[in-house]
Image: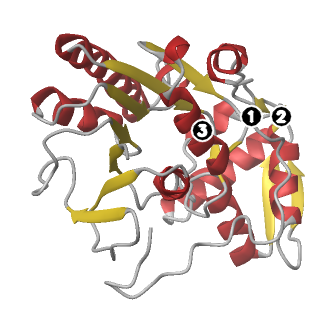
Amino acid sequence: MPQALVFGGSGQIGTPLLARLRDAGWRVVAVSRTRQADAPGVRWLRGDLAQCEGLPRSVDAIFSCGPLDQFARWYAASTVDAPRVLAFGSTSVAVKRDSADPHERDLARRLHAGEQGVFAAAAARGAQATLLRPTLVYGAGRDRTLTRIAELARRWGRFALPRDARGLRQPVHVDDLADAALAALDASAAQARAFALPGGETLPYREMVARTLATLRPPPRLYDVPAPLFAAALLGARALSRGGGFGHAALARMREDLVFDATPAHAAFGYAPRPFRPGAGTFDPPRREPPGEAGP
């Protein structure tokens, strides 16, 4: 029975990945910062990429579903032996590289350094690494974009966008990402490569938001406002700490096409994500379970 070590196992991508590993007959050692209850086939360790006791000496595969830069540092210093490594990064490595926001540029730099670090450490050990770069993630009620939009729309009973928010997007479901990680594991064509993982549909930003709001009950109304007015309103909201996490760089990207090619991933390991068809409850926050009772 193969064994996997999974970092970020209780996160939005790690949770469905654990389910797939268990169904495929893997024994899993999963790491989480919060206390989790063991389950058949899954042993939980409490810790993070900075410190975790009880890690196995060797496994058949290591999966990282958490911060890529932190994983790269851990992997470079780790003594855990594994012939196969799969780590999630983000298409932000390209999207935010030339951002007007210095914090976003720093994120892109850290993602790039993390990718290079993982590949270098794997090569030094004779292991094979694969980097997976999702686009806009949704499906677990824990993302910081669509679920955040749904949260604000629920609170206000309405939502507004600038009229020129027509940039193209490819939201990707967490289940498709978990499937991709497992499929890439056994694909020789995926070794020592990085892949963009966009969703299965390309649609304008406004349409993406409209479909998100349509899942809520009652559906909040979506307003189109002139771009200068929206920018002024956003500035005022940020001054009152009500900007919802939308900065000027994020506002500018609403007009930009952020489109990635899924063909390499499809050719290498059969990646075939679903179109963006969210339903009722898609953007509900996950149910919080009492400490010690959470499952994988």
Looking at the image, residue 98 sits to the left or right of residue 199; the answer is left
Return the residue found at the far bottom.
Answer: 290
x and y, in percent, of residue 36 in the image: 32, 73
Amino acid type, callout 3: Ala
Q: Is the residue marked by circle 1 packed among few (<14), some (14-19), or many (20+) residues within 10 Å?
A: many
x and y, in percent, of residue 221 in the image: 90, 66
**Residue denoted by label 1:** 170
Quarter of image, res 140: bottom right
Instruction: Note whether residue 226 is visible.
Output: no
- How far is disc 3 from disc 1 in space, using C-alphas? 16 Å
Looking at the image, residue 188 sits to the left or right of residue 229; the answer is left
Of residue 72 and residue 94, the one placed in the foreground of this image is 72
Of residue 46 and residue 208, the one placed in the foreground of this image is 46
**Helix, strand, or loop for circle 3?**
helix
Quarter in which the C terminus is drawn: bottom left
If you read the primary sequence from the N terminus, does the residue marked by circle 3 or circle 2 appear first? 2
State the residue at coordinates (38%, 85%).
293
Seen in the picture, residue 288 relative to 105 is either above or below; the reply is below
- How far is disc 3 from disc 2 in space, using C-alphas? 21 Å
Instruction: In the rendered structure, find residue 250 and report the number of the disc placed on it.
Output: 3
